[in-house]
Image: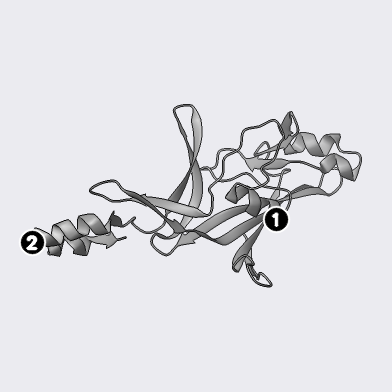
Amino acid sequence: MGFLKKIFGGGGGAEPQFEVVENRLCTDLTKYQVRVRKPSQEMYAEELFQAATKPRHLQFTRFFLLNENPPQLHFAPTLEEAIDWFKGRRLPKDGYLNIFWGEKVSFHCSICRKEATAPLSITKVEQLSVYTNVPVLMEITGWRVIEVASDLMGPGMPSKILYMFKTTPIFKWFNPEPKFICGGCAHRLTESGRQAELEDYVIF
């Protein structure tokens, strides 16, 4: 079970505070659950530990958990990289494709489909240590964003789906997603005497 601690940004323009959930996963008990990637190479965490004879052999570009439902993000080697990758900055060049979630969330008018965006903040990050005790203690630690929030949507979890043979980043919002209507469509409803319908919408 994980536990939380707060991280605070310092100075102007710093990342707003968010919580860090710390977890540990022992490969001796949960075999073949973690895939580790290096440039042009991929292996199970057990294989990484078995082949490591020096600390530098444990270096990786990212790792991910198999069979997560819903699927979540890959783990980066550092907290800074996890935040950057989530926003689409300094994406890893390890021979694998990348996706990112950005700094804003988009939504559409339910009537005319006009698109708008709203700021997105990171509210929770996971720190996962994957380790083995056999024959000696060895571990790797990764970071990923696991919760975000928007003033319009509330809190949610970044996830991804496979659509048309392409992995697409999405958000799974914890609260029912509101219906949106743009100012122009809201004005037209008011002019036509349908103002009461606006109670079901968020106007932007």
Depicted 126 relative to depicted 166: above or below: below
Quadrant of image for the N terminus: bottom right
Q: Name the residue beneath numbered marker 2.
A: 193
Mark 1 packing: few (<14 Cα in 10 Å), some, or many (20+)?
few
Rendered view: 121 above or below 86:
below
Q: Position of residue 107 (x, y in %)?
A: 37, 51
Residue sitting at 54 percent across and 42 percent down? 68
Question: Colour mode?
Answer: one colour
The disc labelled 2 sits on which kind of residue? Gly
Visible in this render: residue 126? yes
Would you say the residues marked 2 and 1 are in contact, meaning their CB atoms lie under 8 Å apart? no
At label 1, which amino acid type do we have?
A: Glu
Q: Tag 2: Cα neighbours inside 10 Å, few (<14), some, or many (≥20)?
A: few
Q: Which mark is residue 80?
A: 1
* Outermost residue toward the top in this view: 165
Cα separation, mark 2 vs mark 1, equals 52 Å
Q: Residue at x 66, y 47 (%)?
A: 75
Compared to 138, does 13 lie above or below?
Answer: below
- Farthest residue in the left direction? 193
Residue 65's image quarter? Answer: top right
